Amino acid sequence: MEHPGILEFLIENFKTFLAFTGFANAVPGHYFMICVGLFFLYLGIFFVFLQGNLKQKIMPTLFFYLGLRFHFYSNDHLPIHVHVSVANSEARYQVYPEIKLIENRGLKPRELRWAEIAIEENREIIIARWKEHFKDKNNGNEL
């Protein structure tokens, strides 16, 4: 008895696959919709990862502390300050020359205290990251 070649083996197993999966009854429209679905999955995955990288460039995150996110916006301006976000709330703290609350849009008093503690503990890091991120914008001027 002769052994089937690889091509015959693949064809036979592909027919079995189609029979068990229900693809044997599929029409060209089904295949088209599967391709459309796969395309949208690709787009979703691509843009989730792209958005994450893009967001990091537009709003670089410095660190997280007790659920608070500390970040800059790429179009920020002097004085050196940091944005603190949680859920849909945000506050802005001046970091240099002194630490003080500039604006609060929804953070609770407890969250403001946590933010101030984190800024005091990481002040040098925030200033260094600000200078690094905005070095081209400030034309090399010392902040």
Image (cartoon, rainbow, N blue to C red):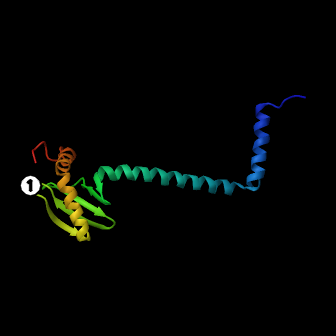
Residue at the right extreme of this rendering: 1
Q: Quadrant of the N terminus?
A: top right
Query: Quick one: SS at disc 1?
Result: loop
Q: Residues within 10 Å of mark 1 (few under 14, many from 20)?
A: few
Q: Is any part of residue 59 visible from this angle?
A: no
Quadrant in the rendering for residue 73 = bottom left
Report the residue at 24% width, 62% height from top.
114
Is residue 131 left or right of 50 when viewed as pictured?
Answer: left
Q: Is residue 103 left or right of residue 63?
A: left
Which is nearer the eye, 5 or 33? 5
Number of numbered labels in the structure image: 1
Q: Is residue 89 visible?
A: yes
| Residue 35 in picture, x, y percent from top left | 61, 52
Which amino acid, mark 1?
Pro
Residue lying furthest top in this view? 2
Q: Quadrant of residue 142?
A: top left
- Along the line of sight, the residue nearer the viewer: 120 or 81: 120
Q: Nearer the viewer, residue 104 or 32?
A: 104
Residue 40: give x, y in percent of width and height: 53, 55
Q: Position of residue 123 (x, y in %)?
A: 17, 52
Looking at the picture, does residue 19 appear above or below residue 89?
above
Residue occupying image coordinates x 23% and y 61% = 115
Name the residue located 19 percent from the left edge and 53 percent from the top edge: 121
Q: Quadrant of residue 36?
A: bottom right
Q: Which residue is mark 1?
A: 97
Q: Foreground residue, 35 or 56?
A: 56
Q: Position of residue 92 (x, y in %)?
A: 20, 62
